Amino acid sequence: MSALTLRNVGKSYGALDIIKGLNLDIRDGEFLVLVGPSGCGKSTLLRMIAGLEEITDGTIAIDDRIVNDLPASKRNLSMVFQSYALYPHMSVRKNLAFGLQNLSMSKDEINRRVDEAARILQIEPLMDRKPRQLSGGQKQRVAIGRCIVREPGLFLFDEPLSNLDAELRVQMRVELAALYRRLKTTMIYVTHDQVEAMTLASRIVVLRAGKIEQVGTPEELYTRPANLFVAGFLGSPKINMLPAMVDGDATAPLAKMADFPAFTLPALSTAARDITICVRPEAIHLDGGEVQATGTIRLVEYLGAERLIHIDLPSGQTLLFHATGPDQHVVGDTLQVGFDLADMHFFDADGVRMEAAIAQAA
Amino acid sequence: MFRFLRRNAAGYVFLSPWLVGFVFLALGPILASLYMSFTRYDMVSPPVWDGLGNYQYMFEHDRRFWKALQVTFTFVAFSVPLRLAMALGVAMLLDKGLRTIGLYRAIFYLPSLLGASIAIALLWREMFGVDGVVNGALAMIGIEGRGWITDPDTSLYTIVILAMWQFGSPMLIFLAGLRGIPRDLYEAAEIDGTSKWRQFWRITLPMLAPVVFFNLVLQTIEAFKTFTSAFIISNGTGAPADSLLFYTVYLFNEAFKFFRMGYASALAWVLLIIIAVFTALAFATSKYWVHYENERD
Amino acid sequence: MKTNVIDRSTVADPEADLAHEIRLRQKAREKRARLLKHAFLMLLSFVMLYPLLWLFASSLKPENEIFGDLGLWPSQFQWSNYTEGWNALPVSFTVFYANSAIVTVLSVIGNLLSCSFAAYAFARLTFNGRTFFFALMMMTMMLPYHVVLIPQYVLFLNLGWVDTYLPLIVPRFLAADGFFIFLMVQFFRQIPRELDEAAMIDGCSPFKIYWAIILPLSLPAMGTAAIFSLIWVWEDFLAPLIYLNDINSYTVPLALRLFVDQEGQSAFGQMFAMSVLSLVPVLLFFVAFQKLIIRGIATSGMK
């Protein structure tokens, strides 16, 4: 098991900065998920940790040992690739054993480890097959097996589930979670899928354009997003963002939003005039809430157990409402919708979160 | 320094055989050849500096040099277009409407593989001889034959025919290129009522232009290098009446028969420049007639 | 409007009949076109093969039947052309074939090793100047052999290598033929890079990656390169002509040429017989590895 320390890590190709001044501590035994839109540098960062990409700036240390110049094989880690990267000309058994044979390890020990991994992943019947004779899920297991046999201090995953179909993806996600509970090894996992991030991570790192936007547990990120980007990136359906103006004095600021009556804000941690108020779709109430507006239903998306209702407000903004109750709304209906102060997130003009003293507001 | 080594060591180790070869078998010889082209050198006594003497003699006095150029250019001008046209025509025949083409493909390619061998050159010599099989065939339809190879007017064309016979490689490349043209282009043209003839000029050729282009360049270079067949068929001399005096044959004889190494080097450099000019011309003009499919505007 | 309403269950459908007839006619037309095409291609095949067939037939004909005779069937099979041809020259063809075999086998090994090394460096390793060297390599492919011929000859003469096989073989171990490097680079690039990376994490050195991952996955390309270099070296005439002076070290192509030089009128049948034999190895490899050869040309887009 390994802990990682990233200090001022940077990566550039010529004048192009992929990653810039990144600091991150990864604790021993945690499941860290790197998430962000495509091109945010998450895969590059993972490959830098793996030793597959050169680090152009800063240091990466594994267990307090700086590994910048250490080749990948000496970093005591293993990696699952997006395409699995199984050696096509070797049987499953050889694939698993190949890395061990490069260490001077006894045949018995190699066999013991390979059999153990095969048992854990339930791929024993496949051991003599070639990769092309395996299904996507089976390849995935072998790829994970190839990592397990090395008993590394650190597992790296580069979007490992993105080549699987939806059903298998859910299944492998559950198995990965089980594997983590069993091995308790440090894992770093790159994905663009927020469901994977939320379900697997002990902590999530949200990256954008080579910089960390926020680090925290899934719950912290969901309930207290540090900025507008994180608020918008995590959560599906997407959070409602409503621009607002702050008026009045600092002790009793008054918020003015289109479509809603003005209301008294709780004291905010910083003073700003133009702010954005965010409300999650599931925090919207029908015919209730401390702040209310009237709108018309534009679209109802039926998802089975729930419905997503798109509501047009008079000014033209749209409110997304996540309905779970047995209501019978149809397009064109007029609704009274509202939400509570406690469910609001406030962001200043730069998109930075403002803390609200909710208790005083009541 | 350590870092530089670590990053580059493996690459240079793997490249080293080629690198050594490049220095001693290509770069060094090219430069040496350039130097020797300014000298008189018979391999017995050391080279004697002669400035531009070789080149001056070549351009002003050497009739055989001009003859060799004429023979070689004539050969290139006939053999390359004929071979490519043949290759393209047959490739198009094979490309559409037939289920199995494997055997045809193999038969048409076979001459390309054998064509460079001495055996074939010897065969050609006898087939086009005075009492060769070609005259035999002509006699059957009442035409009186002649010594195709001993007649300076026709000898070159026997080698053009030999070159044409070897249209297999460009045919295979064209075939691969034709396979790469999306069928829906033809279907769209069909719906628009475009005639087959126009389809060839408006779809096939433009889509194939990059392949045609590279083949033209490569085949032209290959044609300039033609040696073995001309050497064997002319019995190593370029006879009759220098009608088979291919540039390479002339160069070879100057170097290894008469041991005029300096002069032969000058000849080699002129050949190098001719080929370089042709290649450069082809690339320079290519943007007017070669359009790559994935070109960005 | 009413006429459009046809009870399809009772009335024979004229539209369907028409469609059927059109389809039949179309098929007939396509079949005619195909037959015509086949006829033409067969004729062309015959023309293409005729010289080879005639060569083979002539190698079995008595001397007086060879010339002016178009026929492909000898009146009597004169196998003695082969047995006598084999020993017609001062040195037996056994020696020539042995010489050719030595040169060819060593050259092929040299080509495969050195070219795959260079190709691996170009396709997979990062080092300063890679694109520059790659461009140089591509340029040497265009270089006419005649330009480097004389200095190379001087070099090998000074090394005392003339009249040995070294000038024919050593350049092959120095990746002198860029075509094969190019062919292999094209192939190596199709192998997913993630395999190299997985192997790197699995503790492989660059050499181990080359040996345990890239080479085993490139067997088709290696096969193609092996066959091409085998055929070209086997047929090579110019280099042996320059470097080999002693008839005892002649390769097969040089030996064949001796038939021309001593053109006694009685030697043609024997010359053709030996010509046929010289083509046999090439033909055998072509028949056995046709697919590899054809794919090799298509992927490299050359030669």
Image (tube, coloured by chain):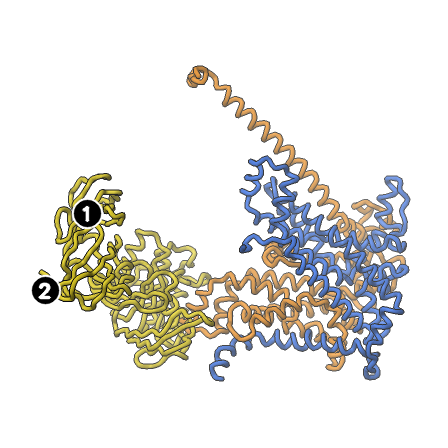
Chain colours: A yellow, B blue, C orange
Specify whether C158 is left or right of A295: right
Q: Mark 2 sits on what residue?
A: A360
Measured from the top left, where is residue A75 in percent x and y? 36, 76
The residue mark sitting in front, 2 or 1, is 2
Residue at (64% x, 40% y) in the render: B198
Q: Residues within 10 Å of mark 1 (few under 14, many from 20)?
A: many
Measured from the top left, where is residue A346 in percent x and y? 21, 62
Disc assigned to residue B169: none
Q: CA distance from mark 2 to mark 1?
A: 30 Å
Amino acid identity at mark 2: Gln
Measured from the top left, where is residue A357 in percent x and y? 13, 65
Asked where in the image residue B242 lies, by quadrant, the reply is: bottom right
Amino acid identity at mark 1: Ala
Q: Residues within 10 Å of mark 2 (few under 14, many from 20)?
A: few
Measured from the top left, where is residue C84 in percent x and y? 81, 60
Q: Mark 1 sits on what residue?
A: A323
Element assignment for label 2 = helix
Residue at (75% x, 52% y) in the render: B164
Instruction: Mark yes or no: residue A176 visible.
Output: no
Task: Pick out the residue farthest to the front.
Answer: A248
Residue at (77% x, 74% y) in the render: C150
Location of the C terminus of chain B (image quadrant): bottom right
Q: Nearer the viewer, residue B99 or C154?
A: C154
Instruction: Mark yes or no: residue A354 visible.
Output: yes
Element assignment for label 1 = strand
Specify whether C263 is left or right of C35: right
